Image (cartoon, grey):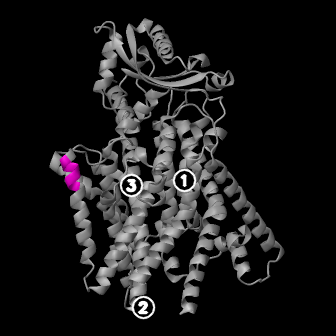
């Protein structure tokens, strides 16, 4: 019986991970987070303050203090000597800061009297959330420009609906470009391009990858939230398969880099094969069109994040991360619009998620330069490998120099702003250009292999299929698994710079196999019409998913409850809302604005040709 009990405890803690400890000593110490009722405080027009306290013992030998010290020694627990409080105070204290601080400290010490502890105030940030916010000229410009644009879309749609078969010259081109009706028809129209049909599996993978990305963002948001269930968060980090899931989330972005580079490489090889050259003029044109594709939705979201409207319409309690994003947008909006914000700390990025766009666009630029050199100076594809090797060496050197782990280690303490988005480690290991170029380089290489061998027939049998499955799934799983452990300094540097390459290689082999008819059931799942269709607005979905996921807690009135059921409900809700909102943004912003900018660019080229 004793043996059975021991194995049961082992499986609960390390295998299943959903079991709770029978005795939770942390219930005997002060709660990590506490919050007064926000809406009630706002209605009374009082101050609502976000505060952080450090706890100090009256008796260092007390059981409470020993438990607090124990928490600091546990890497999977929060340091319980630092607590967070959201408190309501009378509004007349706003001009008497010393009295406010004294009031806050006295109140906290009164609540700690039974714990034999004292509190020292570290930080305090107070606001009267009932006071009207001052609006600027920029705020009104954003609002009226958005309303005007929606009015134009509505008028074009109405005109298109009334005159379905009309043709009024050049104006009609713009009307159809803006019409929701025509854009929806274009979106639904089947794509007959031969390469698109061969790579339908690639489109399906994009959608499944986006679902995993949204899932990951929801999980991270739960883990970083201001909750009463910190024990659930600590248990989450102690669980083996959940830890694997977190590290998988840090690798999954490589799939997007592989796909993006694959499509570019395939298109470039097709153009070069047909035209036997690659001019600087063409490269500049492709770069310009790429930027035009990214700019409309990105500019729309950044303008709204810079404005005061979100804080007026959604006047939630203090949020360190939301306030951080607003300050970053006020200061560094230009870096996001110019797609260079990946060179900033994530805490200084306007819209943190756009680091991926910056990396992708810069890799696009570098790839165009590499192909220009390859074609015009007769240098082989090995230049891509040399470039990958250079960035691999840079990444490995920085890991070794800073003594960083293989991958960013998510833990309760590392979820704090100063230890995650506010630190250099997340930039080096996750969002930097050099740490991600390997996956993009693999996409360039395999895009070339696809172009070269796409008309070759592979005899598909069980051996080929199982070997392909082993590489497709085995390499990414192996890369994530190896990232779970600690290694000596040199080995950490080597693995840290290599595991993303291994993950990307598995994805690239998987896509190549799908394009040649390998895969069986997996191929059918990847080429299923519904996910392939959803991939058509994946870009808009990616950008709006941050607003959906991280905006959920803007109107909280009390501490957020957390458990497995709540987390999974949030995941399913966020996935559905993100794709739905992405479709709306795609039809209202991305597609019509991209059409207009593309039409203007093509007209300018036509005018130049005629003038010659």
**Disc on the earlier residue, 1 or 3:** 1
Q: Is residue 309 left or right of residue 158?
A: left
Quadrant that contains the N terminus: top left
Residue at x 37%, y 67% (from the top left corner): 363
Residue 543 lies, with reference to residue 307, above or below; the image says below
Up-down relation of residue 63 to residue 17 (above or below): above
Q: Say what secondary structure mark 1 lies in.
A: helix
Q: Which residue is mark 1?
A: 302
Residue closer to the observer: 4 or 200: 200
Image spot of residue 241 (x, y percent): 38, 43
Q: What is the spatial separation of the Cα atoms under label 2 and label 1, in whole angstroms?
A: 40 Å
Residue 400 magenta-drawn?
yes
Rounded to the nearest angstrom, the CA distance separating label 1 from label 3 is: 15 Å
Where residue 365 sits, quadrant-wise, is: bottom left
* Residue that mark 3 sits on: 342
Q: Which residues, given as a range, are shown in magenta?
A: 396-401
Question: Which secondary structure class fits the magenta region best?
Answer: helix
């Amino acid at each position: 019986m004793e043996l059975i009990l021991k194995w049961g405890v082992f499986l609960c803690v390390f295998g299943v991970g959903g079991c709770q400890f029978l005795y939770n000593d942390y219930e005997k110490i002060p709660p990590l987070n506490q919050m007064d009722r926000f809406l009630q405080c706002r209605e009374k027009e009082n101050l609502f303050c976000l505060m952080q306290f450090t706890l100090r013992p009256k008796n260092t030998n007390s059981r409470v203090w020993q438990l607090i010290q124990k928490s600091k020694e546990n890497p999977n627990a929060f340091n319980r000597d630092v607590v967070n409080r959201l408190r309501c105070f009378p509004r007349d204290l706003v001009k008497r800061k010393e009295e406010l601080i004294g009031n806050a400290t006295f109140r906290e010490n009164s609540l700690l009297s039974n714990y034999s502890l004292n509190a020292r105030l570290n930080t305090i940030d107070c606001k009267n959330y009932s006071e009207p916010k001052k609006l600027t000229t920029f705020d009104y410009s954003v609002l009226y420009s958005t309303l005007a644009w929606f009015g134009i879309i509505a008028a074009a749609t109405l005109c298109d609906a009334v005159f379905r078969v009309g043709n009024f010259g050049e104006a009609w081109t713009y009307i159809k470009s803006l019409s929701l009706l025509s854009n929806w028809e274009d979106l639904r129209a089947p794509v007959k391009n031969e390469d698109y049909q061969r790579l339908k599996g690639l489109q399906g993978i994009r959608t499944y990858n986006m679902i995993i990305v949204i899932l990951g963002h929801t999980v991270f948001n739960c883990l970083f939230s201001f909750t009463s269930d910190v024990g659930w968060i600590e248990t989450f980090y102690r669980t083996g398969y959940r830890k694997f899931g977190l590290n998988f989330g840090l690798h999954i972005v490589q799939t997007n880099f592989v796909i993006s580079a694959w499509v570019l490489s395939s298109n470039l090889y097709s153009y070069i094969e047909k035209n036997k050259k690659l001019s600087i003029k063409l490269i500049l044109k492709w770069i310009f069109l790429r930027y035009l594709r990214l700019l409309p939705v990105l500019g729309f979201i950044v303008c709204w994040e810079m404005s005061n409207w979100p804080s007026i319409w959604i006047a939630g309690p203090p949020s360190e991360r939301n306030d951080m994003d607003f300050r970053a947008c006020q200061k560094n909006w230009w870096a996001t619009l110019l797609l260079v914000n990946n060179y900033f700390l994530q805490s200084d990025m306007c819209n943190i998620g756009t680091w991926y766009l910056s990396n992708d666009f810069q890799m696009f630029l570098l790839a165009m330069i590499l192909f220009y050199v390859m074609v015009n100076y007769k240098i082989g594809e090995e230049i891509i490998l040399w470039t990958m090797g250079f960035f691999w060496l840079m990444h490995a050197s920085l890991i070794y120099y800073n003594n960083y782990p293989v991958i960013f280690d998510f833990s309760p303490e590392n979820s704090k702003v100063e230890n995650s988005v506010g630190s250099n480690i997340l930039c080096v290991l996750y969002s930097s250009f050099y740490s991600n170029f390997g996956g993009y380089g693999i996409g360039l290489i395999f895009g070339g292999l696809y172009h070269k061998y796409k008309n070759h027939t592979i005899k598909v049998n069980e051996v080929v299929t199982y070997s392909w499955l082993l590489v497709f799934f085995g390499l990414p799983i192996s890369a994530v698994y190896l990232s779970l452990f600690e290694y000596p300094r040199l080995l950490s540097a080597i693995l840290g710079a290599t595991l993303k390459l291994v993950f990307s290689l598995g994805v690239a082999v998987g896509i190549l196999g799908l394009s040649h008819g390998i895969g069986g059931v997996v191929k059918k799942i990847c080429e299923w019409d519904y996910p392939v269709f959803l991939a058509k607005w994946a870009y808009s979905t990616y950008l709006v998913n941050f607003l959906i996921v991280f905006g959920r807690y803007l109107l909280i009135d009390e501490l957020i409850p957390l458990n497995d059921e709540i987390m999974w409900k949030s995941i399913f809700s966020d996935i559905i809302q993100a794709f739905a909102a992405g479709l709306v943004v795609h039809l209202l912003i991305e597609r019509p604005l991209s059409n207009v900018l593309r039409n203007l660019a093509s007209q300018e080229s036509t005018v130049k040709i005629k003038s010659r």
